[in-house]
Image: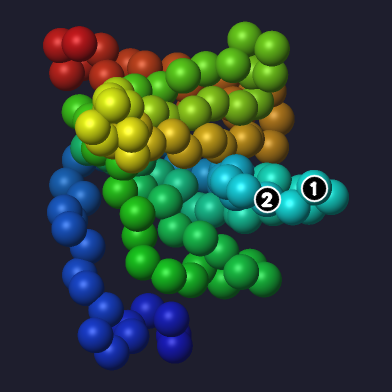
Amino acid sequence: EVHAQRAGAAPDLQSPMGPVQVEGLLRRKKEGHGRFEDPYKMICVCRLQDNVLRVRLTHNGEVVGLEEQFDLKEWRVLPRNDKPDRFSLTRGIPSANNPDQASVVTFKAESKEEGVEWIDEIQKATQGMGR
């Protein structure tokens, strides 16, 4: 496994402890994509565990890069009523002195049913945290 251990790779910030709430493939929207480019061409292996959405990018079917973690204590889910296979995670509120404070990451599931399942599980996780 060449990609499992890279020299200088940082260990995961948190090692997962609890049961996996949901896992599977999601397509991540590329911000600033070209006019004729598919904005959802980045396929990620995603896992919701310990109320953290853990995301690893894939390339040609291989998992690559470091795991990104979206802690649901900090991120809120925004479902799309018009497109149930898509949802966004958002964090922070932009302000005049810090316009970059808001972050948005958008994902697309392979089907409406999968999208609904991801949204349901993320909402259940955030409700369990007393929000």
Is 23 on the left-hand or right-hand side of 6?
A: right
Q: Name the residue furthest front.
A: 96
Where residue 77 sits, quadrant-wise, is top left
Residue 40 percent coordinates (x, y): 68, 46
Quarter of the image with the N terminus in it: bottom left
Is 106 on the left-hand or right-hand side of 130?
A: right
Q: Where 116 falls versus 111 (above or below)?
A: above
Is label 2 in a helix, a strand or a loop?
A: loop
Task: Answer few, some or many: residues within 10 Å of disc 2's Cα (few below 14, many 20 plus, some between 14 and 19).
Answer: few
Is 17 on the left-hand or right-hand side of 24?
A: left
* Residue positioned 20% across, 70% down in the render: 11
State the residue position of label 2: 33
Residue 10 percent coordinates (x, y): 22, 73
Q: Where 120 falls versus 110 (above or below)?
A: above
State the residue position of label 1: 35
Q: Amino acid at mark 2?
A: His
* Residue positioned 43% across, 81% down in the render: 3
Residue 4 percent coordinates (x, y): 37, 79
- Residue 72 shows up from this direction: no
Is label 1 in a helix, a strand or a loop?
A: loop
Residue 6 percent coordinates (x, y): 33, 85
